[in-house]
Image: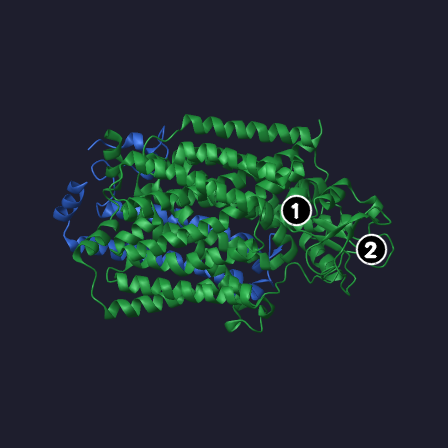
């Protein structure tokens, strides 16, 4: 629908959109760096060195490769979700702009999120 | 009650449930057929995505493969989960904001080109058919082993069920049946894993039991025991890899990037109401996937220890019933090379090729093999696919657990098949018919086309299930390599580079696909004899070459786009727009009111 786009463009000068985008890219790059380190770094490239250490009865490199990296992936996505929701709100580009619903409430509403949306 | 009766009950009840859900969630419009009206809650979508993603390969084959290759199985574990991070951070939210039905939709609109759209459609259909053939095969194996019906009958029953809910319900029906199928498959995967972990290590959490000491009082770590057993038999230590580091790196990357570029996964994120939901939905999906993926390596190691201990040096006449049952389905074979009547399980192939059975039985009652024997001392052939299915029997778990595993394997195969068939039918009805061939058709006619093409796709998938092409295993490398070298770069640059234009995208895609396909075809089909590490370029196997294809795609498209005109203003505005979450939910409300 058009009025949203128009509204956004009039409300927010493009410098604001650019600042939002820059901060978004920074967040993503930071998280992807961790993603790379836990999987390719600890699970592949330096796995042999890490194998000299024991963790929960596993050799550490082996554990990172077959278990640890997967747990890290899950955590990374949830950190991303949290950070982006905050970022969206900070720049006023979130979808609930007119009545912001904090994450805890938004994701736990009875009958799913759609019930909570304001009717435009 | 015996295993077979229980299996009939479990499979019957779950099938009835899927059909019930399909009737309850029929699709009435193209919107509902393609993306479930965009009204699926993020949690339900996460679950559906997990079921969609975890195929017969994840459920049946993966733990089995890891069981046989040990440390190197890492490529699948990380490769098939890490892609969700890329998907969540780089693609899903933006493609949701774009707000149309398919991946070719995005490619066609973003690159203002029907050529790009057609290339995307062809890739989508190819990738999806590759995948779907394997699912129908999985259905056939489960039916023939557990219900003792012909593979053909099994595949036909599977086709009928998928036909019913995919054609009737479209994405809406598929989504809610996938939620149910996820519950069935994860329960079926976890129950035996927990049982076996308890028995072997005394720890009920398989993820921890895997690193614990054995419950036999010896105080030895399970993995150390496995390392020494494997080394003794000549397989090499379980926790040490045999693939080169560069190859592990490239294969993992190709699988991860391929995952992020698979159309049937991406399209799931079009079904949630908002951008915000698309992000967290990817998180939920990965949680649900991780439950199985962190259990699989544990199951693999338990199964390996069990298998070696039960089978090696056991006289054939004293082998347990499961051994003979799987021998009857041709997935286990034994040749008594040294004529001692005992099974020697060592490294190396027992004979050349897949087993060809002769009529009649040998001295000890074993099925006779026609294949020429090899020189080594190994006498046993075991198909990797049976590990998960046979695991409860190997560990002597109760009959209902075995029946549950059969129902779980069917849920995994059917959910993935349905998701893929939907993508195929959407590509044909929407991207090809509506967007290119017959733009004037109405919504009702388009829906009709979608249903007809779904039915058509199911028939082809069923045909492949009954007459499996010998190259299914080979083409899986193809599906991921192609997704990694074509879709991922094009989608990524479509979002993150406003300067990327159609010339860049098309030449990039063609370079990526051409290089990757050429490499795979050469080593898998033209000259399979040369498919060894010494001959690979930079030591990268055909499974990992998609990563290099992707890099070439990026380089070529960047270069070409800088030498050709900028994309039109309209497209640049569209890219601006998809970068901002605001407004995506609006389309959904707009739809609700009509």
Q: Is residue A104 visible?
A: no
Measured Cα–Cα span from mark 1 to mark 2: 22 Å
Q: Colour of chain B?
A: green
Q: Which residue is mark 2?
A: B336
Residue in view at x 59 percent, y 62 percent: A51
**Does dot 1 land on a helix, a strand or a loop?**
helix
**Does dot 2 land on a helix, a strand or a loop?**
loop
B490 horizontally vs B215: left or right: left
Examine the image and state in which quarter residue B40 appears: top left
Q: Which chain is blue?
A: A
The C terminus of chain B sits in image quarter? top left
Residue count near mark 2 (Cα–Cα under 10 Å), binned few <14, some 14–19, many ≥20: many
B284 horizontally vs B338: left or right: left
Of residues A46 and B432, the one drawn nearer to the viewer in this rendering: B432
Q: Is residue B139 visible?
A: yes
Query: Where residue A67 appears, x then y in whole percent?
Result: 55, 52
Q: Which residue is mark 1?
A: B386
Residue count near mark 1 (Cα–Cα under 10 Å), binned few <14, some 14–19, many ≥20: some
Q: Are marks 1 and 2 in contact (CB under 8 Å)?
A: no
Of tags 1 and 2, which is closer to the observer? 2
- As drawn, the label of residue B431 is none
């Amino acid at each position: 629908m058009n009025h949203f786009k128009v509204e956004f463009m009039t409300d927010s000068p493009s410098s604001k959109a650019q600042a939002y985008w820059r901060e978004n890219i920074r967040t993503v790059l930071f998280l992807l760096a961790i993603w790379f380190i836990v999987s390719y770094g600890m699970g592949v490239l330096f796995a042999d060195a890490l194998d000299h250490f024991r963790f929960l009865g596993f050799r550490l490199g082996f554990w990172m490769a077959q278990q640890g990296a997967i747990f890290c992936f899950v955590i990374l996505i949830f950190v991303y979700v949290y950070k982006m929701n905050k970022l969206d709100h900070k720049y006023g580009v979130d979808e609930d702009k007119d009545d912001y619903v904090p994450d805890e409430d938004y994701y736990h509403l009875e009958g799913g999120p759609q019930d909570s949306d304001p009717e435009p | 009650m015996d295993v077979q009766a229980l299996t009939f009950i479990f499979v019957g009840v779950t099938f009835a449930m899927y059909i019930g859900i399909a009737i309850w969630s029929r699709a009435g419009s193209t919107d509902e057929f393609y993306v479930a009206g965009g009204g699926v809650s993020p949690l339900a979508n996460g679950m559906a995505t997990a079921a969609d993603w975890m195929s017969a390969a994840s459920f049946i084959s993966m733990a089995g493969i890891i069981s046989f290759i040990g440390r190197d199985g890492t490529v699948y574990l990380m490769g098939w989960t890490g892609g969700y991070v890329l998907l969540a951070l780089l693609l899903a939210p933006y493609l949701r904001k774009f707000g149309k039905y398919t991946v070719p939709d995005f490619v066609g609109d973003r690159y203002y080109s029907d050529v790009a759209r057609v290339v995307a459609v062809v890739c989508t259909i190819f990738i999806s058919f590759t995948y779907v053939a394997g699912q129908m095969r999985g259905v056939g194996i489960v039916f023939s082993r557990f219900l003792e019906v012909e593979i053909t009958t099994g595949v036909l029953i599977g086709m009928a069920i998928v036909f019913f809910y995919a054609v009737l319900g479209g994405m809406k029906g598929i989504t809610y049946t996938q939620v149910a199928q996820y519950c069935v498959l994860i329960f079926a995967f976890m129950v035996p894993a927990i049982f076996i972990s308890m028995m072997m290590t005394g720890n009920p959490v398989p993820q921890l039991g895997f690193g614990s000491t054995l419950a036999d009082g010896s105080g030895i770590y399970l993995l150390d025991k496995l390392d020494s057993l494997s080394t003794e038999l000549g397989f090499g230590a379980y926790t040490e890899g045999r693939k080169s580091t560069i190859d592990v790196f490239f294969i993992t990357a190709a699988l991860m990037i391929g995952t992020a570029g698979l159309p049937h996964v991406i399209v799931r994120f079009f079904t949630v109401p908002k951008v915000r939901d698309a992000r967290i939905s990817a998180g939920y999906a990965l949680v649900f996937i991780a439950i199985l993926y962190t259990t699989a390596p544990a199951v693999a190691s338990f199964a390996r220890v069990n298998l070696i201990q039960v089978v090696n040096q056991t006289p054939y006449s004293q082998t347990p019933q499961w051994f003979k049952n799987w021998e009857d389905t041709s997935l286990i074979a034994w040749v008594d090379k040294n004529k001692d009547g005992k099974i020697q399980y060592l490294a190396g192939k027992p004979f050349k090729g897949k087993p060809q059975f002769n009529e009649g039985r040998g001295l000890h009652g074993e099925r006779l093999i026609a294949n020429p024997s090899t020189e080594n001392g190994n006498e046993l052939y075991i198909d990797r696919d049976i590990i998960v299915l046979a695991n409860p029997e190997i560990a002597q778990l109760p009959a209902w657990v075995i029946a549950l595993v059969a129902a779980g394997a069917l849920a995994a195969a059917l959910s993935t098949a349905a998701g893929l068939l939907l993508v195929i039918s959407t590509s044909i009805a929407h991207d090809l018919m509506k967007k290119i061939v017959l733009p004037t058709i109405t919504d009702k006619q388009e829906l009709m086309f979608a249903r007809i093409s779904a039915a058509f796709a199911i028939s082809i998938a069923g045909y492949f299930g009954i007459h499996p092409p010998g190259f299914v295993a080979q083409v899986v490398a193809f599906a991921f390599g192609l997704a990694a070298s074509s879709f991922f770069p094009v989608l990524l640059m479509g979002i993150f580079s406003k300067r990327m234009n159609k010339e860049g995208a098309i030449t990039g895609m063609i370079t990526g696909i051409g290089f990757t396909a050429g490499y795979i075809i050469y080593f898998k089909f033209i000259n399979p004899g040369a498919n060894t590490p010494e001959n690979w370029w930079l030591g990268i196997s055909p499974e990992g070459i998609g990563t290099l294809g992707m890099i070439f795609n990026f380089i070529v498209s960047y270069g070409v786009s800088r030498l050709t005109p900028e994309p039109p203003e309209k497209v640049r505005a569209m890219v601006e727009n998809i970068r901002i979450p605001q407004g995506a939910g609006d389309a959904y409300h707009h739809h609700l009111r009509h």
